Image: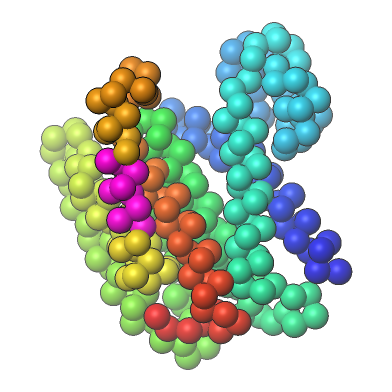
Amino acid sequence: MEAIIYIAIFIIGTLFGSFFTLATYRIPLKQDITHKRSYCPNCNHRLEFWDMIPIFSYIFLKGKCRYCKQKIKPRYLLLEFFSGTTFLLFAISIKLNIFKLNVNTVVYLIYGLLYISTLFLVAGIEKQSGKIQKSVLIFGFVIETIYIVYLYIFNFDIYKYVIYLTIALILLIIDVIICKKSEKQNYILSILALCFYMASTTNEKTVILSVMCTVLLEIITRTLIKTKKIKEQQKHISIGAYLCFANIVFFIIQNFISGVNIWKSF
């Protein structure tokens, strides 16, 4: 029975991964991501159900559009697979058991997956446009606020969540004000807001490890740039993306280490 649950979560993860590819492309362009049907960005042909089955459609279509035969980038397949794998690892990390399910576990599962989804979107958009998408962060703040209210109702300690989320929100507001005046995002403020948002969900140690991993990846990237092992179009250093992916990894590891007590205060 547990195997069926884990398979279902993996499939849900691949579906989310398919949505991430759509959202990271459309959100920066301010296009609708909920009602407008998926289409091929090359020929603009509307995609049918059989064209959008995560992983399998890419394999069966041999990585090409069914209509214009344009090659589809492998990153779509990789994102779907890694999204499914990440969802699965998160479920395993909290020791999800169908026979021991309770409201707290289900809420934490849903919240954790939405948190991971937020970071996936932030990373994808930042990698593509070089900006931290404020609307995605705001979505994360809303989900976090709902989660805090839930914890408060059930008498859990919410001070850490409130403090870090408030700081993240203040930093984001300052960034918005600066952006309106200069018409340019303050990248450092956006990264700081992202860090405090991460701290409100994980813990200080996890964020510090994420930052350290990001710095290491940045050093490696700069080294590759200097040695000309990275192509010109790949030279953008996506600090936000590195930070998000590192935090997802350490978030899952944090759950494995904390054991069954997923409500433990760190």
Count the marks: how many? 0
Residue occupying the point 61% across, 36% down: 78
Give the answer, above or below, for where 92 lies relative to 102: above
Q: Is residue 6 left or right of residue 138?
A: right
Residue occupying the point 70% across, 21% down: 63
Of the pair 56 and 51, the residue shown nearer to us:
56
- Residue range of the region highlighted in magenta in the rendering: 210-219
Give the answer, above or below, for where 167 lies relative to 135: below
Residue 227 in sight from this viewpoint: yes
Whether the magenta-drawn stretch holds residue 233 is answered as no
Residue occupying the point 49% across, 47% down: 120
Residue occupying the far bottom of the picture: 155
Give the answer, above or below, for where 90 lies relative to 77: below
Residue occupying the point 34% across, 78% down: 160
Residue 236 in sight from this viewpoint: no
* Quarter-of-image position of residue 208: bottom left
Q: Is residue 174 left or right of residue 239?
A: left
* Quarter-of-image position of residue 32: top right
Q: How is the image coloured?
A: rainbow
Residue 46 percent coordinates (x, y): 70, 21
Whether the magenta-drawn stretch holds residue 214 is answered as yes
Residue 137 percent coordinates (x, y): 39, 52
Give the answer, above or below, for where 122 lies relative to 74: below
Of the pair 75 and 114, the residue shown nearer to us:
75
Q: Is residue 108 left or right of residue 197?
A: right
Indicate the quadrant containing the N terminus: top left, top right, bottom left or bottom right: bottom right
Residue occupying the far front of the picture: 227
Residue 171 percent coordinates (x, y): 22, 57
Q: Main secondary structure of the magenta part?
A: helix
Residue 33 percent coordinates (x, y): 56, 37
Indicate the quadrant containing the C terminus: top left, top right, bottom left or bottom right: bottom left
